[in-house]
Image (tube, rainbow, N blue to C red):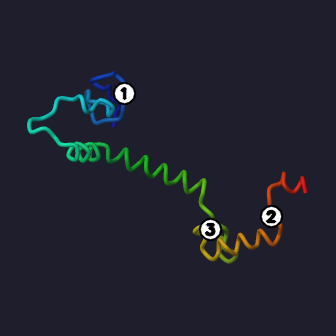
């Protein structure tokens, strides 16, 4: 896909080819006879931007996983084991940390 200019504002966006309507201005484009209702317009847009929507979703999913996933290494094979919040292994980890007085460095320095 190439970057193409919008018919309304000349901002560029990823699209197939030629001048098209930028998503912000798509409602201003000439409507076909029979006029699309809101549900049809949403479906048409979803289909037109499916690849971009899927890619953005995947980037967000990977970023969230990287920032928030709870895991530890298996002591047999060395691969990551993923925990779900409040599962038994997560509760065991929390218990272990409490028993061994884990805390913020600044809190330990004050105590």
Q: Quadrant of residue 74?
A: bottom right
The answer to whether the residues at label 1 and label 2 have Cβ atoms under 8 Å apart is: no
Q: Quadrant of residue 99?
A: bottom right
Could you tell me how far apart the alpha carbons at marks 3 and 1 are, in whole angstroms? Answer: 42 Å
Please indicate whether residue 12 sits to the left or right of residue 99 in the image.
left
Mark 3 or mark 2, earlier in chain: 3
Could you tell me how far apart the alpha carbons at marks 3 and 2 are, in whole angstroms? Answer: 22 Å
Please indicate whether residue 92 sits to the left or right of residue 45 in the image.
right
The circle drawn on residue 80 is 3
Q: In this rendering, which labeled residue sits more in front, label 1 or label 2? A: 2
The circle drawn on residue 102 is 2
Q: Position of residue 71 (x, y in %)?
A: 63, 66
Mark 2 residue crowding within 10 angstroms, few (<14) / some (14–19) / many (20+)? few
Q: Nearer the viewer, residue 37 or 47?
A: 37
Mark 3 or mark 1, earlier in chain: 1
Q: Nearer the viewer, residue 66 or 78?
A: 66
- The C terminus - image quarter: bottom right
Residue projecting furthest to the left = 33
* Mark count: 3
Mark 1 or mark 2, earlier in chain: 1
Q: Position of residue 7 (x, y in %)?
A: 27, 24
Q: Secondary structure at mark 2?
A: loop
Q: Which residue is mark 1?
A: 12
- The N terminus - image quarter: top left
Q: Quadrant of residue 14?
A: top left
Q: Secondary structure at mark 3?
A: strand
Could you tell me how far apart the alpha carbons at marks 1 and 2 are, in whole angstroms? Answer: 51 Å
Mark 1 residue crowding within 10 angstroms, few (<14) / some (14–19) / many (20+)? some
Q: Residue at x 77, y 68 (%)?
A: 97
The answer to whether the residues at label 3 and label 1 have Cβ atoms under 8 Å apart is: no
């Amino acid at each position: 896909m190439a970057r193409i200019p919008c018919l309304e504002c000349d901002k560029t966006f990823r699209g197939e080819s030629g001048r098209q309507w930028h998503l912000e201005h798509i409602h201003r484009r000439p409507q076909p006879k029979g006029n699309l209702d809101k549900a049809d317009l949403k479906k048409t847009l979803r289909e037109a931007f499916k690849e971009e929507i899927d890619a953005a979703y995947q980037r967000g999913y990977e970023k969230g996983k990287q920032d928030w996933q709870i895991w530890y290494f298996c002591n047999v094979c060395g691969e990551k084991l993923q925990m779900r919040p409040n599962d038994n292994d997560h509760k065991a980890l929390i218990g272990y940390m409490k028993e061994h007085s884990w805390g913020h460095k600044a809190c330990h320095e004050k105590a």
